[in-house]
Image (tube, rainbow, N blue to C red):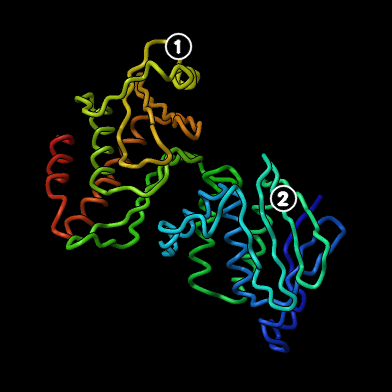
Amino acid sequence: MSFSFIFFGFEEALRGEVSADTLTIAIKHGDEIMPLGDCFTKDAVGDIIEAIAFAVNSCEGVKELYIRSGKCDVLLFPGRYCRDNSITLRLGTYEPISYIIFKINGDLIQLKIRREDRKDVTTVEVPREKFVPSAISFVRSFLVKFPDEDLMRELRIVEEMASRKGFLPTEKKFEIKVEWLGEVKCRNKKFPLVYAIISHGKEIFSGLVEPVAFAGSLLEVLRSIRGLENRCQVEITLYEDVIRRASSLLGEESLEYFGPCFGNEWPGLLFIFKKNREMAFVNVKTGSVVRASMEEVEDEVVRAVKEVVEKLEERGEGHWLRKELEEILR
């Protein structure tokens, strides 16, 4: 059954006949159309972007969206924004006010719709693989006509998240993204806040990281590729399922492995296995497992470390990381 968000009065708003903030937002599910109320359109679009982040990766998706878009207070009060695998959004409605409780049930996203002027509750369930691209298309079509830099930035974030999680088609290549968010102050010191993502078509690793620790772990990956000593070893005897997943990609023979310490509690332990000139990445918590050639991994690792080092050197830090990189590349 088809699903989409729609605005009543959108064409009139484009012609300047009515204010954009007098439009009615509605949900179309199959043949049924459910008006939710008049809304502040940019607030509605912002809430739909949050709903996309939630549909992609539950509360972790909302947290990533908030952090990367600069709303870092989610770190202090995470439960205020999303909890118990559900999020409540108003979609900007003001007449009447409507509340939608979004909840994930496996491959479905459930919408429980409560309207201020009605006692009944309407429940709609949509496959997440349909909800995500439909909602993204709605947001993009609005922003084409009513541009907003902040909302466009948030849209790009959720589109990237959706691609990493398999909800949108994406090119399969190994990538490391380091996003600098600003600084946090602790007593008399300031520390950079960085969001790092490693992906190969789908996500391998993502989360807030300390940049020096992250770059140090990338250097461990580079050492492994170059056949040098790995300093960050992890006991793997308790992770037989991880070995099976790596073997399914690289073969049953004995595999070299190590566990780089990326300086991040979530998503947890990441194992990297080697065989010949290929590497298998296995994330213990998320279950993600991918294969990449050492050549493509090396290129991205070197580029990402240089990017981190350049940013740190602007702060008068990180010179030793550059020296270590140069020694490994000799």
Residue type indicated by callout 1: Glu
Disc 2 from disc 1: Cα separation: 42 Å
Q: Position of residue 175 (x, y in %)?
A: 40, 43
Q: Quadrant of the C terminus?
A: top left
In this view, the residue in front, 94 or 118, is: 118
SS under mark 1: loop
Extreme residue toward the right, this view: 31
In this figure, which residue is indicated by the disc labeled 1?
252
Residue type indicated by callout 2: Gln
Q: Position of residue 70 (x, y in %)?
A: 41, 64
In this figure, which residue is indicated by the disc labeled 2?
110
Q: Quadrant of residue 188?
A: bottom left
Q: Is residue 272 left or right of residue 138?
A: left
For residue 59, above or below residue 257? below
For residue 75, above or below residue 236? below
Q: Quadrant of residue 88?
A: bottom right
SS under mark 2: strand
Tag nearer the camera, 2 or 1: 2
